[in-house]
Amino acid sequence: MRAWIWTASLLLAGCAGHYQPQALTPRQAATLEKALDGKVAGDKVSCINREPQTSLTVISNNVLLYRVSRRLIYKNELIGSCSGLTNGDTMIVRGFGSQMCRGDFTTSANLMTGMTTGACALGDFIPYRTPGK
């Protein structure tokens, strides 16, 4: 098992320097803008707690939003592309402990066929908060 994780990490590290994320489509950009409307970006963090995320929104194959509350959303730009996410495939994060962190290995998989459709790693988490009154 450790050899598999080590090999996957090496493959991701080798690709990370050459990976250029795809630009968002106009529809994806509008969805992202609507989700973050009225919120202010904070300093990026390397890890967030797995709980109490209430929802995951896939913006594109390499941009995710984790909604913690109405006032807090984390944006994550994946390292690599989990190319099946926009087709409804499931994201599988291989992390340990109670947090998700930058570099945690992630795959996308079609649960109907059992096939892996993409491989990526979590990037930094950028918090977007609704400003206080």
Image (cartoon, rainbow, N blue to C red):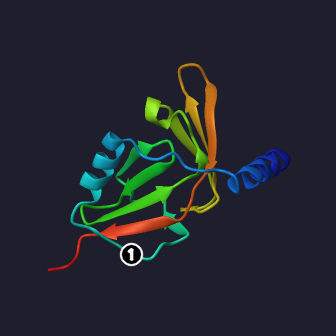
Residue 132: x, y in percent?
Answer: 19, 79
**Residue 1 percent location from the top left of the image:** 81, 45
- Give the quarter of the figure containing the C terminus: bottom left
In this view, which residue lies farthest toward the bottom? 133
- Quadrant of residue 42 within the rendered picture: bottom left
Q: Secondary structure at mark 1?
A: loop
Q: Quadrant of residue 36?
A: bottom left
Q: Is residue 3 left or right of residue 96?
A: right
Question: Mark 1 is on which residue type?
Answer: Gly
Q: Is residue 37 above or below residue 20?
A: below
Mark 1, Cα crowd under 10 Å, few <14 / some 14-19 / many 20+, is few
**In the current view of this chain or complex, which residue is farthest to the right?**
3
Of residues 12 and 26, which is closer to you in this image? 26
| Residue 51 visible in this rendered orientation of the protein | no
Residue named by callout 1? 42
- Given residues 9 and 36, the one toward you in this image is 36
